[in-house]
Amino acid sequence: MSFREELSLLVRSRYPVIYISTREEERADSAIAKCAQEMSDRTVYTWDYVDGYQGNPNDNGFGKRNPLQALELIEKVPASAAALFVLRDYHRFLEDIAISRKLRNLIRLLKSQPKNIIILSAQLTIPDELSNIITVLDFPLPNVSEIRTEVEQLLGATGSSLAPTDTDELIRSCQGLSLEQIRRVLARGIAAHGSFEPDDIDLILEEKQQTIRQTQILEFYPASEKISDIGGLDNLKDWLLKRGSAFSQRARQYGLPHPRGLMLAGIQGTGKSLTAKAIAHHWHLPLLRLDVGRLFGGLVGESESRTRQMIQLAEALAPCILWIDEIDKAFAGFEGRSDSGTTSRVFGTFITWLAEKSSPVFVVATANNIQALPPEMLRRGRFDEIFFVGLPSQEEREAIFNVHLARLRPHNLASYDLKRLAYETPDFSGAEIEQALIEAMHIGFSQNRDFTNDDVLEAVSQIIPLARTAQQQIEALQDWAAAGKARLASRQSTLAERIEQQRKNDSTAAE
């Protein structure tokens, strides 16, 4: 159901107060006006704090700088006159006791007369006492059809011409922007060259980055890491490589659904975040990073509003990668929190979207303590697969040393004994190996020479890996994975060897 169809239904059903949260005020006004025109008998009265009511000569300026008086006009309009009263930025006055009481007093009148109040605001803020009389209606960003109409009109008006393939790419790139932002981007390209050129499509990415920065919920993350930068994790790499073309039109024609997402659980410093960045780079998709803590606001309803805004923005920018780092920190043990159920509602909205989303948003969630997550998060349907990323085996540690040293000393790589370095670093994670190399570089730099194998080994001897300082927690996490609750990211790993040994022991005991 489209926005206009849903608004028309609510109006005809005599929902008294409809709250539309959007930053596209001009476009929302146009949609409301078209909805009223389609119903043929509705008059639209528009109010704002500075100018009062506008559009109707008899009431022009009424209620200026007086939000309570703005509600009084509803009683003055004849009972038989069907009308929509659009109140801009009215959310700022809902906490006022006089406004709140007046709205509740108007409910009986609004139910018996063909009149509706529409609150138009960029923020969703509803006091508890008004939550049962206000209906929230989402105003979506422009769809492909609306964007195409706008783009073709603007290009035609300025005499710019693009090839059909470039036009299609421009329209796809504009998804996730408001009509006003699209106009600004096109005007910027036209102002620079006299007409909009195919190369100007890159300006749209800059506008999207600006949009994401303004929301302060999602972060546009540049991804330059490659899958080859990941040492080991062969099972995970194979899984990703098989899905490299899964977002293409050819995959849709084949009948493949869009990939849903991936949960990466495991020990800290083993390459989970690096994998998220490498996926975006390999699949040539924008990477959006979500800090779940930013979803939570101090006002009633603000957290739920931010969650819906995050979902709307991610879907509008699709296809994309949504990276949620350390998701266990946000939702672990939320049942016992004394936050009036805010975390529970945010969690419910989020996992429902994970299960029901049809947009090509590939979610990559990482967790260090997956056992702390609610079981609803881990059931099939939320993610395509759950991978466990454990400590690297000796072979994988050799590959990790090779990746780092090939970047740090490509001209001198052969002078390092990778096999010995891998052998001398048992229980080291990828992050700890990188830190050991940095420490070795400090040793060599302080003595005005290049660092050597011995410097690396000296640095290794000074580092106590997490596998020893948090031995109990890591063993518990490995036991969880050893029980077959997640797919192993590594083809050959210390955990795989441990699982095989456990099976042999069980078999011997049975005999």
Image: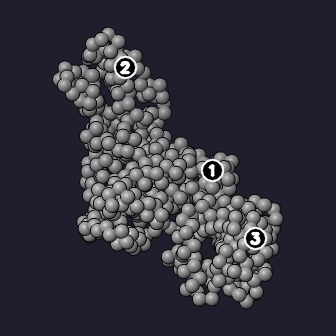
Mark 2 highlights which residue? 439
Query: Of helix, strand and loop, which one carries label 2?
Result: helix
Q: Give the residue type that dot 2 points to.
A: Glu
Residue 168: x and y, percent? 31, 67
**Label 3, label 1: how many angstroms apart (C-alpha)?**
32 Å
Asked if residue 34 is positioned above or below residue 152 in the image, the reply reads: below
Q: How crowded is the residue under tag 1: few (<14 C-alpha within 10 Å), some, or many (20+)?
A: some
Q: Give the residue type that dot 3 points to.
A: Gly
- Going 24% across and 21% down the picture, which residue do you hit? 420
Mark 3 highlights which residue? 63
Query: Of helix, strand and loop, which one carries label 3?
Result: loop
Label 3 vs label 1, nearer the camera: 3
Does residue 400 appear in the picture of this structure?
A: yes
Given residues 392 and 17, the one toward you in this image is 17
Q: Give the residue type that dot 1 points to.
A: Gly
Q: How crowded is the residue under tag 3: few (<14 C-alpha within 10 Å), some, or many (20+)?
A: many
Label of residue 297 in the image:
1
Q: Quadrant of residue 496?
A: top left
Asked if residue 400 is positioned above or below residue 283 in the image, the reply reads: above
* Tag 3–tag 1 contact (CB < 8 Å): no
- Mark sitting earlier along the chain (2/1): 1
**Label 3, label 2: how many angstroms apart (C-alpha)?**
69 Å
- Mark sitting earlier along the chain (3/2): 3
Quadrant for the C terminus, please. Answer: top left
